[in-house]
Amino acid sequence: MSVDLRVWCGSDSRRIAAVFGRQIESGVPLRPELWPRRRDLRAAERYCCSVSIDVVAIVTCDRPARVIDCLAGYAANCRRYERRPELLVVDDSKSPDAEHRVRPSLVKLAREHALAVRYASASDRRRFADVLAAESGVPVEIVRFALLGDSRCELSVGANRNGLLLDTIGGCVFSADDDTSCRLAAAPDAGEHLTFMPSGDPTEFWFYPDQSAAVDALADTDADLLAPHERLLGRSTDGPAAGAPVALTMNGLAGDSGMASPRYYLSLTDPSRARLVASEEAYRGGFTSRGVIRTVRQPTICAESFVMTTFFGFDNRELLPPFVPVQRNSDGVLGVMLPRCIAGSRVAFVPWTLRHLPVEPRGYSTEDLWIGAEHVRFSDVVIDGILAHSAVAAPSRSAAITQLGAHLRQLGELPLGAFETHVRSVQGFRTAAFTTLLSQRLLTYRDMPPYWASDVRRVIERMDKARLSETLVVPRDLRAQHDTETARRLSQDLVAMFGRLLEAWPAIVDASARLRAAGIRLSRLLGDGD
């Protein structure tokens, strides 16, 4: 079998010749015997990639045993493919002894794999926030919000990821959650042809009774974890796909879906839909089990699509917007921000799955489908605010981010009633768009099968009724922690605070870069002396 270098290098013969010291006509494959050693294949592949990933990071919270096993798997893959990235653990654990529980194992892992391991705790983020505020001139409460979240909110997932962004400025990074496993499998019928999708979701779904069945459906493959991301990160495209270099790359997923609600499944088209409604038993299982495979079949670049950071690569050499520091779905909000903060932004999907296997049992309840149709989350309020932004052409990413920030801050400073009227208006448009889409699906599939059509109509009805509810725009995740009136005011306050963060973000990033150049980072290098 011959190896066609166009898979790695496109049709650029000069890049091939630069590796092998010979001129090769574009598109002419090399016979295997002409490859001196396997490592030369890897060298050629990396040379032809847009970037080199120099950090592999794990974001974690209160899972000391899992984070060690998780990081060891990713480190082992790097070692097998002769890579030496920096390993980084960004820990949002609230327990005061969290670091002491993981540090010895991390130091041992660093020795075993001969790799540098760095660690950042919530205390490190707090310390760095004060240093960063002094360096940037940004009020300390804004920097602390970026890196620590808000004490009135239960979750600070986005703040932890903001720590990752600021600690890795200037490089390209692969990040994974602590409940993932570096067990690679090719997507079903995977191909190599690079495709472009202007907008929408390029992934397909396969549904299984549980997460174990989902991962067992794919055969593990010993492959270089980082290479598919390096081929796409930072890559610019021509023709109809022309735009900014790819900023984010995402793997496919096998195991737990990572989705809060299965409501999205009602809008699927074939072939994913055909798998979901193959029988009523399969259909009901899809709305109770979270076990899925979700992936593209070939490398795909998208102009606008969802963002899910269960495992993803990002190009941190250029300015990226921050995550919403509090509550869930901060990655979903990031996906909405990207095209509004980066002109011609691009994200990419690779046809390789990794495992997502939370320890705690997860499944959808019978109410999850309907609750999501009747109540918004805080992330929805932020998205409503972003979608309401009438952006003018900005000369730079910095200007676009600060413009969006000013819009959200001004929205958050309105009288409470005016703020909620504004949010309700945008949420109404989003609801109408989704119910219209569902109505189109009913027409397309001629109300078949009946069990699917019945659920679609019920969701449409409940979403239409919810638009009239006084509490529609009061986030249910904030109401779970506070009374309704407190949740209303907190939601608006957090939107304003996130706006202030966006306005200050370019200055915060510039200050972080200066501190890094001076040898000051958020994370700490672990060694034998720790």
Image (cartoon, helix red, strand yellow):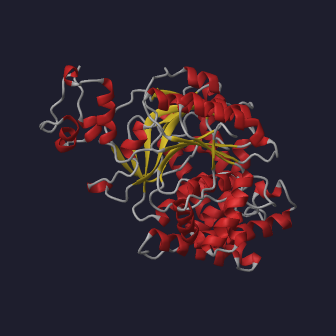
- Horizontally, residue 207 falls left or right of residue 300, namely right
**Residue 423 x %, y %:** 66, 69
Location of the C terminus (image quadrant): top right
Asked where in the image residue 67 lies, by quadrant, the reply is top right
- Do we see residue 378 in this rendering? no
**Residue 472 x %, y %:** 74, 61
Q: Residue at x 54, y 30 (%)?
A: 113
Q: Nearer the viewer, residue 149 or 42?
A: 42
Q: Nearer the viewer, residue 370 or 123?
A: 123
Q: Residue at x 76, y 36 (%)?
A: 101
- Horizontally, residue 36 falls left or right of residue 475, namely left
Asked where in the image residue 82 lies, by quadrant, the reply is top left
Q: Nearer the viewer, residue 386 or 509?
A: 509
Q: Residue at x 22, y 23 (%)?
A: 2
Q: Residue at x 24, y 27 (%)?
A: 3
- Do we see residue 304 in this rendering? yes
- Horizontally, residue 139 falls left or right of residue 398, namely right
Q: Is residue 337 above or below residue 13?
A: below
Q: Is residue 200 above or below residue 514?
A: above
Q: Nearer the viewer, residue 186 or 500?
A: 500
**Residue 527 x %, y %:** 63, 39
